[in-house]
Amino acid sequence: MLSQYAFIGVFAVVAFALPVIGLLLAWLLRPKKPNPAKNATYECGVETIGDTWVQFKAQYFLYALIFVVFDVEAVFIFPWAVAYDRLELFALVEMVLFVAILVGGLLYAWRKGALEWH
Amino acid sequence: MDFIRDFFVNLANAWTTWISGGLPPWAVTVVNYLVVGIILVLMPVIATLTLTWMERKVIGRIQNRIGPNRVGPWGIFQAIADAVKMLIKEDIIPDNADRPVFNLAPILIAAAAALLWAVIPFGRGMIGQDLNIGALYLIAIGSISTVAVLMAGWSSNNKFALVGAFRVVAQLLSYEVPMVLSIAAVVLLAGSMKMGQIVEGQVVPFGLVLPLALIIYLLAAIAETGRAPFDLLEADSEIVAGYFIEYSGLKFGWFYIAEYSNLMAVSAIATTLFLGGWRGPGVAAVPALGPFYFAAKTLVVIFVLMWIRGTWPRFRIDQMLAFAWKALVPASLANLLWIAVMLKLPVPPGVQWALMLAGNIGILAVTLGLLGQAAQRHAERQGLVGA
């Protein structure tokens, strides 16, 4: 069982090695002639104004918050789905209740306007 | 003849016998893992060359153009010319970039795209490793690319890249939920997260039993790979190229290869979960046919995704996120519960599956009806049609 993950480990090393080898090869082959204009931030020819790492609107953050709830839900749904044919009818009732609570959360977010783009 | 019947597995066995002559068993395992790993990592890179050519040809034809036709017959060497160009192009790192993160992002995204292939079954017994959490592994590895894209967008110190990265957070996270729920529907039906067992369980392809889950998976997969019509994270007419605007040369190349590797991976996953994977007529007698069926089905899915890209205009971000949360998530939750109820009905499996199909079509019809009503109300509010 655990030895299966040895393959994933070896595979991960190979998967990370390939792009690194590719970039090393490109580093050997490519020219390198930097100058200030070339290395400036690209904004379609207009010089950039102010700092880039500014405070940004929290709109995107709200989606991430709702996502966390549903991702945790997935962690519960997958074991339930695998063991479902061995479980009693109670498992179904339990999952209906669980999903009902989540849908309640989704409806709350919806009514509060968290799913609207402003 | 027997060797040909199960060609790939026999080839692997012959190889193992050959190298185990002079090596201890643990070394044979390590060498085999390395060989499989290198094949699985190189395959998407090489297939990318073909796929970029195919995509340009397909989209060219859809847009009444010829597509690439200069480099080699029908332009088939165009992709190789592009690869050489990317390899020898100067690498530009903007002065204010966060260098370690900037350099790590393309490596991470390429590695994450390659890691997906570890649990995809190409044929019976032809799988990197049939993990008992295969489906969950795909979801977990799939979300690494979100981090990589965010790293690229943040470290570039460019406002376009930053906007692209923030869109990534909203878009990839939103579409991850319906994707996970539609995969959960398949896991529920198959009773296993092992990719091999999911394929073995598909006497009837699950796409015929759960068409709604297949549609939701494909829509979410388009959004997860950031392709048109959900390509807001790199919308060229708004934010130029989004998160990889400052990348050039092979660093950009790895983003590009990862995009096509992901396109192939989501098509292969759709094939495995919904279209019966390597199953097809004659596979029981000649197992070597399996990989060809698998490749053919995957290519059909890839073609459909290219077709969608060539025909739909880009969505606006508010429409796109509303579509995920207000249409896809409720529909896939209803679908999941419907399947769970059907599985507990005391009737034979054939009847259960027919009822699941009926429920799927019903949920699809209700979802489309509600979407239509919402669009109607929106048009009336905007004064586009007479109230």
Image (cartoon, rainbow, N blue to C red):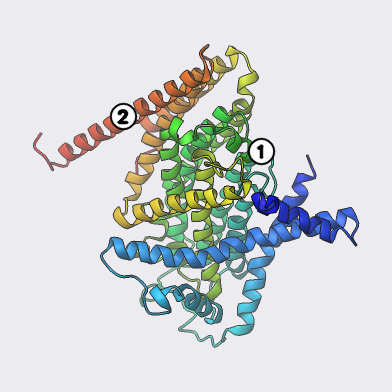
Q: Rate crowding at label 2 as few (under 14), some (14 to 19) or many (20 or more) other CA atoms within 10 Å.
A: few
Q: Rate crowding at label 1 as few (under 14), some (14 to 19) or many (20 or more) other CA atoms within 10 Å.
A: some
Q: Where is residue B353 drawn, in percent x and y?
A: 47, 24
Residue displayed at 47% across by 45% down? A61
Q: Where is residue B75 drawn, in percent x and y?
A: 40, 75
**Quarter the C terminus of chain B occupies:** top left
Res B210 visible: no
Q: Where is residue B316 drawn, in percent x and y?
A: 31, 50
What's the chain of the residue with tag 2? Answer: B
Residue at image mark 1 = B133
Res B344 visible: yes
Question: Which is nearer the eye, B129 or B217?
Answer: B129
Same chain for marks 2 and 1?
Answer: yes
The residue under label 2 is which amino acid type? Answer: Ala
Name which of mark 2 and mark 1 comes first in the sequence: 1
**Is A83 left, or right, of B91 in this rendering?**
right
Residue at image mark 2 = B365
Question: Which is nearer the eye, B326 or B270?
Answer: B270
Residue displayed at 19% across by 35% down? B376
**Is B28 left, or right, of B327 in this rendering?**
right
**Is B229 left, or right, of A51 in this rendering?**
left
The residue under label 1 is which amino acid type? Answer: Ile
Q: CA distance from mark 2 to mark 1?
A: 33 Å
Mark 1 element type: loop
The quarter of the picture where residue B250 lies is bottom right
